[in-house]
Structure formats: C-alpha cells, structure tokens
Amino acid sequence: MNLGLSRAPRAPRGGWVDPDPRPVGLWGRWARRWCAALPLLLCALSSACGNAPAADPTTLTVAVATSPTTLDPRLASDTLSTRLIQLTHRGLVRLDDRLLATPDLATWEFLSPLHLRFHLTPGVTFHDGQRLTAADVVATYQSLLDPALASPHRGVMEAVARVEAVDAHTVDFHLHHPFAPLLASLTLGIVPAGYQGEPPPPGSGPFRLRRWQRDQQLDYARFEGFSGAEVTLPRLTVRILPDATVRALELERGTVDLVLNDLPTELLPRLASRPHLHLLSSPSTNQFYLGLNLHDPLLADVRVRQAIACAIDRTPIIDHLLGGQATPATGLLPADHWAYRRPRDLPAYDPDRARRLLAQARGEGAPPLAIEYKSSTDETARLIAQVIAEQLRQVGIELTLRAFEWGTFYGDIRAGRFQLYCLTWTGVVEPDLYYTILHSHAVGDAGANRNRYTNPVVDGLLEEARTTLDEARRRALYGAVQEIAARDLPAIPLWHPRHFAVVNRRVVGYVLTPNIDLAQLATVRLAP
C-alpha cells in the first residue's frame, strides 16, 4: 500500500495547486500544522485538568462546533439543527438502527397503495400542555406547501394529494400515485396547529427547551409530561464551542460529557486514553465517492472508469488521513442497510489490471491520460486529491488538481463542468436516493444525476422500486441496481466515514447509532 505523494501534482493554469514546493509526505501540509500544534495543545490539556470544577450531577453537557440555524422542524435542513430537534419534537415515525420506519407518534396501515392511514397514540401533549391531535399533524404537513414558510421539506408532499383528519386520533394521507419512500420521510416533528408564539414552536419530545443563548448554549429540561419511555436524564446543556482545541480541553477537564464527530482524529487516541473518557464508533449514513462525467469522451469508456477504480487504494487513506474513522464503500448504501447487497463485480485495488484496462482502451504505448480533478478548498479534500493523483499517476493517469471556493466548485459540478471530483452523500437513509442520482430523468436541473449516467434497465428497476410496497421486492430491485452500478461505475464508491463520540464515563447507557438520534440521551443516566 502506498500513499504516494512523492512529488507535487502537475500545476494547472487556473484554480489551486499546492504552492509548497517540498515533497508532500504522508500527512501533507495539513498534518504538519497539526503535528506542530499538538505538543502545545497536549501541554494545555495536561495543565488544565487539575483545575476542573465538579460536574453537575444532574446535567449532561454536549459540545458542538456551530450554532443551529433553526429549531423549527419544518425549516431545519442542516445536520445540527435536525439533531437538536430530535430532543424536543416527535414525528409520526422514526428510523431504527437499520434505517427502517418504526412507530413514534403513530402506527400505520396502507388501506390501499394510494391510501396511508395513521393511528395516533392517545394522550400525547405538547410542552405547553396542549393535546396533540390529528389536526396538528394535518396542519404541520399542509404548512410545508405554504410559499411564505419556504420549507426545505416541501418535496415530502410531492406524491401526496391531500392530508385529512378522520377524527382526533386518525390521519389519512391520500397519494397521487404509489410511493414507497414516503413512509421513511414522515419523521418530521409535529408542531401545534396555528401556533402564534415565539419561535421555535413547542414539540412533544422528551426534552423541552428552557433557554437558547444564541452562539453560546442551549439549555433543556426533562419534559415531565412525556408519553414515551421514562426520561431518566433531568437536564441537558448544549454548548457552542467553535474551536476544536477548546472542545478537547473541556472533555479533558470533565466540563463537557460528550462530543460527536467534532474533533480532529489525531486527538482521539489521547482522549480515549484518559481514564474518565472512552471512545465510541459507529457506521454512518454518509458516503464519500469519486464522481466522473460520463459525457466526457475519455470517461465515457467504462474501461477507463474501471482502471481509475482499480488504481485507488482506499486502505492507507483511511488509516493515515482519516484516522481509521471510515470503512471502504462498495456502493451508496452501508453494509448494515436493509437494502444493501455486496456487488459481485466491484473492481478491487489492482494497479496491474488498471494498466491493462488503460492499454485496452487507448492502445499500447499511449501517452499518460490527462484528466482534470476539481475539489473545494477544504484542506482535507485537497490532501485526498493529492493522494488520489499520485496513485493514478502510478498507472499512467496524470491528474491536474484544481480547487475552488465552495460555491464555484459546487456550481461547476451541478452544471457538468468537470471530469473528476469528490463529494459526500450525507444521510443516506432511503434507497430511493438511487432514483435521484442514477435515473435518466434526474440528469441536469431535474435532479442530482451529476455524472450524466443513463441506463434504461436501471431506470425501470428504480421506477418499480419506488412504487411497490413489498419490502422484499424493493430489496431485490435495489440489489440489482447495486450490481449494475458496480459494473458501469457512474461513480466510484470510496468510503463511508464513521461516526465517533468521545464520552465521559459517568454517562451510562449511551449508544452511538448510524443515524445519531439524540433523543436516545433521554434514557441515559449520570453516575455519581
């Protein structure tokens, strides 16, 4: 296994190329900066630990890097806001560890492929004491269509003809056409109908929001009227600490009990070695992939795409650049997803085969293949680009690396102005995402088929998979899609980043899950 990087990539005429003329070693400039900073940081950690105040025995403290943008479930689209809303709001359904819909506020039945009925749990109340009824469910989902609200979840209602209350505890969704992915999308937190108070609207979740100090912290208290499992945690505080060093310090001092993902992986062994801390790790629902423009004459040849896949060695990248916090990907879905199938024909790391495939595609003795690789200016993204460039150079592919600020980079990808790029699909829950990224109707502005892939067989499989309500049939259809995608390689799956959490050992009963449901904190206990 070879990370390469024995020389700098070929410089482009525009965009970014690494300005450091020295050879880039295993960790690159990003790692050099961290290695230089680590001794100072570790000294600070050691000296600070003796001055820690006693932890509040009734309050669990979580540290995050940024502030939530909103706590209204109808408006939240960023990861942090969505996770914090899990503390205060409940939806009709929630997702279990296999990312299948399971009852939350309601059970359900399909009266027909076009008629979905929910039966609400009686006796549920909002934090303000108001009863939660079918009218609140109807109002919540109807509000998604209000242009004045401008909800990013409006698409949930695309297949819905109408939502109506049958009685106080029964809600009917009438559909335009059968749509199997609908159920997993009905996790949206329910809010009171006609709420006119200060935002955010109250929910019915295990915690109620007591105070929100913008850009500082959020304080929660146990909701005594919660109708679900017993809430064993009296209070919860979320502190906004933008500096990763400060988050690590607070963990060391014991003034923060939990940090999810928001730490440099280089610090994890140090923090995990502390007797009062431990490290948890879990698969995630994210996938990092290499995108290819199939309208490009070079990349339209599947042998070239297969050669690129065979030239990339994921293992050293994961071990050395990602701190081991990732697992190799075989496709869009992680291995524990209910619809996952391991493809039989996925190209493995094999530089010799990569060279043979290139020779078949271009002829013996052809000059190195020149391809442009675009990335954002994120430091880790640039380092990964350098590693991939060196690995491809070893089989006869010369990459020109160009990096742009996010808006320009993402605009180029959406417009098809690229040959290669890397991005992450986040929150891969419903396998219908395959329709969005592989169906021919989703090419261009109509969807997220960024790589311009078209295959009538795949189109047919995806169309059937989103209309059948038979889970076993859906699993078989998506399995066939995964087999074809592994052969055609419209994108090259690289890895699934892992979730990790550093947790104070006084927190008893916390389990890190792939979809990071913060509502689970309601049932933890704080040891003396």
Image (cartoon, helix red, strand yellow):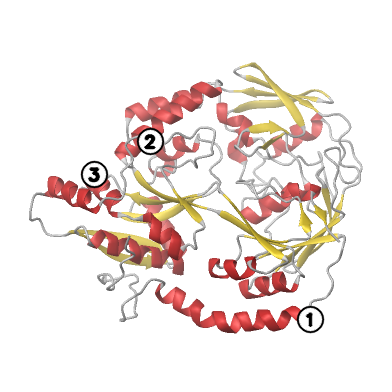
**Left or right: 74 in relation to 362:** right
Give above or below for 95 relative to 4. above
In the image, residue 122 above or below residue 370: above
Name the foreground residue: 257 vs 365.
257
Return the x and y of residue 302 as percentages of the image width and height: 24, 42
Tag 1 residue: 51
Q: Residues within 10 Å of mark 3 (few under 14, many from 20)?
A: some
Give the quarter of the image for residue 316: bottom left
Residue at coordinates 45% horizontally, 66% vertically from top-left?
380
Nearest to the eye among marks 1 and 3: give it. Answer: 1
For numbered disc 3, what is the local secondary structure? loop
- Asked if labels 2 and 1 touch by Cβ distance under 8 angstroms, the answer is no
What numbered label is drawn on residue 343? 2
The amino acid type found where label 1 is placed reads Asn
Q: Nearer the viewer, residue 181 or 98?
A: 98
For disc 3, the marked residue is 300
Q: Amino acid at mark 3?
A: Ala
Amino acid of disc 2: Pro
Give the structural element (helix, strand or loop) at label 2.
loop
Alpha carbons under labels 3 and 2: distance apart: 21 Å
Q: Is residue 69 above or below residue 517?
A: below
How many discs mark residues in the rendered view? Answer: 3
Mark 1 or 3, nearer chain start: 1
First in sequence: mark 1 or mark 2?
1
Which of disc 2 and disc 3 is earlier in sequence? Answer: 3
Residue at x 70%, y 64% (from the top left corner): 277
Q: Position of residue 136 (x, y in %)?
A: 80, 35
Q: Residue at x 30, y 67 (%)?
A: 4
Q: Secondary structure at mark 1?
A: helix
Report, in whole angstroms, how far the alpha carbon at label 1 lies from the one at label 3.
Answer: 62 Å
| Tag nearer the camera, 3 or 2 | 2
